[in-house]
Amino acid sequence: MKELQDLARFLEQGESQKVLALTQQLVDSGVPPQTILNDGLIAGMAVVGEKMRNGEMYLPEVLQSAGAMKASLRILQPLLAREGAQSRGKILIGTVKGDMHDIGKNLVGIMLQGAGFEIVDIGLNVEPQKFVAAIAEHTPAIVGLSAMLTTTMLNMKTTIDAVAAAGLRSNVKILIGGAPASQKFADEIGADGYSRDAVLAVDKVKQLLGHTS
Amino acid sequence: MNRRFEQALNCEPPDRIPFVPAIYEHKAWFVGETPSKVCRDSKLFTAALLAEYERVQPDALTVGIDVYNVEPEAIGCKVIYYEGKDTSVPAIAPESVVFQGSEEVASLKMPDPHKDGRMPLNLEVAGNITKLLGKEVPIRGALSGPFSLAAHLTGLENLFKLMFIQPDLVRELLGFACEVIRQYGQAFIELGCGVVIFDSQASSDLISPLLYREFVLPRTRALIEHFQKLGLKDVPLIIGGNTTKMLDEYLETGANNLLCDVKADSQEFLQKCSPARRAFRRNMDSTDFLTISSEDVHRRTVKCLEESNGYPGFILGTVILPYGTPLAPLGAIRSAIQEYKRS
């Protein structure tokens, strides 16, 4: 459908106003919200993710696209809820202690929300014990830890250790991300997974939860 | 300036490869205090630098613990300090941005390096250390780069947004940032020490080389030129992350001393820095120094030194050493450097 392709293209270009208008137009013309989400927004963000990985797009441009997606989701989410679309799972995200960076975490939140997951964002500079308390309160399937600095990334391990010490480690899968992180580091600190960007984080979450699509 | 470091900067073969580990918050560990305490106490800060020099023997010293915070704090941003034994690094409170984008840049307070925030404290420490060690080792006052300072004043995400919707305002904000840095840098130079500019928010891990060229490069080039005209032979520009993609722009800043971080391509740096006669500091990965053996550190160092391919402008560094990093791995690096010299 041409309009859905246009929606994906506008999203890729970060054209928030056009994305909003076209989302509304598609809703008004009776296109199912799930179709708009999958074939427009998620398809568009997949291209954004690929371009980011290829060095064709950078964070400022990606944020423009993510902002457009967020705006569009504000129209779609109430409709999806009304249609009885079920959450695909609850994800708790936060930036670890000592780290004030949240752009990456926020992007992951938007992407996962778009993919149908429920997001509990507990913010930045989060103490390990606050993660523990939030896990106990919200019982998420996955916890996403973010860090932007080589020094604060060590607090990912402290957090994982605190979750284990609280007896909650087997209740959740832990995914890490952020500029200095790597799969090697994830393995070393006992995380269940690593994602190098927000788009891949969706695939990683699905993989960890055993979702097929 | 020490001879070895000067030779490397001039791309002449030094007696051995200089070693400049990234020690900022870790300085506090040398005096058994927290970064939050040491960065607000000139006596402790001075003692920490002396201890760092004595125990690590780096080929250059940087006066800076929580680099990036000092200028924004002097302009009006709030810094979160940690109390008690908490060794977290002080950071700018994200909610304390002082520029939203709707106001005039001229409304921002131009700080006085001798009066505002911790600028006077850092200058006092730089003066102390320059008097004590200035003849033995280069002393550099840490400065924020223009893009990183602007990012702290308005928030990184907002800065990204403003680059698209109000590019002229961003240029004006960067101009303000440069003036702050110029005045603060000049105050360090008047004390007889050098400067080192940190601008990792402008890395090509975050923004495109195109945006860097459009917004950041002209301001940075002018700033570096200004410091060079004041007589500084060494004006390092530290941009972390994988900067391989922006290496042409990096060189065009005029900085004589660049950073080739862990994820950057050292061979590409060699190819481009050699004809331009620029020195660069190659960072080795030190994030696991708390857990790996000295033998592993030694092996990793040798591997990293081999990347230099004999280039005389090669300086060895580390990523930022976490608070509490033991001395043993740093000793292992030094011995690997000594052996490499002999082989």
Image (cartoon, rainbow, N blue to C red):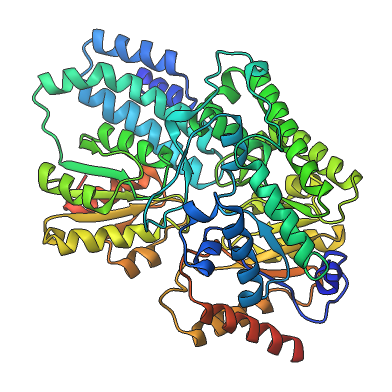
**Along the horizontal axis of the image, is B338 left or right of B88?**
right
Residue at image x 72%, y 66%? Answer: B60
Determine which quarter of the picture holds residue B125. Answer: bottom right
**Where is the C terminus of chain B found, in terms of image quarters?**
bottom right
Q: Residue furthest bottom?
A: B343
Q: Position of residue B331 (x, y in %)?
A: 59, 82
**Can residue B119 be seen?**
yes
- In terms of depth relative to the viewer, which is nearer, A56 or B200? B200
**Along the horizontal axis of the image, is B207 left or right of A21?**
right
- In terms of depth relative to the viewer, which is nearer, B307 or B42? B42
> Is residue B83 positioned above or below B162 on the image?
below
Residue at image x 32%, y 15%? Answer: A23
> Is residue A140 positioned above or below B15 on the image?
above
Q: Position of residue A90 (x, y in %)?
A: 16, 41
Q: Position of residue A94 (x, y in %)?
A: 30, 44
> Is residue B12 positioned above or below B102 on the image?
below
Q: Residue furthest left?
A: A84
- In terms of depth relative to the viewer, which is nearer, A32 or A91? A91
How many marks on residues? 0
**Can residue B144 be seen?**
no
**Along the horizontal axis of the image, is B11 left or right of B93?**
right
Determine which quarter of the picture holds residue B281. Answer: bottom right
**Where is the N terminus of chain B found, in terms of image quarters?**
bottom right
Q: Residue furthest front?
A: B43
- In terms of depth relative to the viewer, which is nearer, B216 or B128? B128
> Is residue B101 positioned above or below B13 on the image?
above
Q: Position of residue B308 (x, y in %)?
A: 72, 74
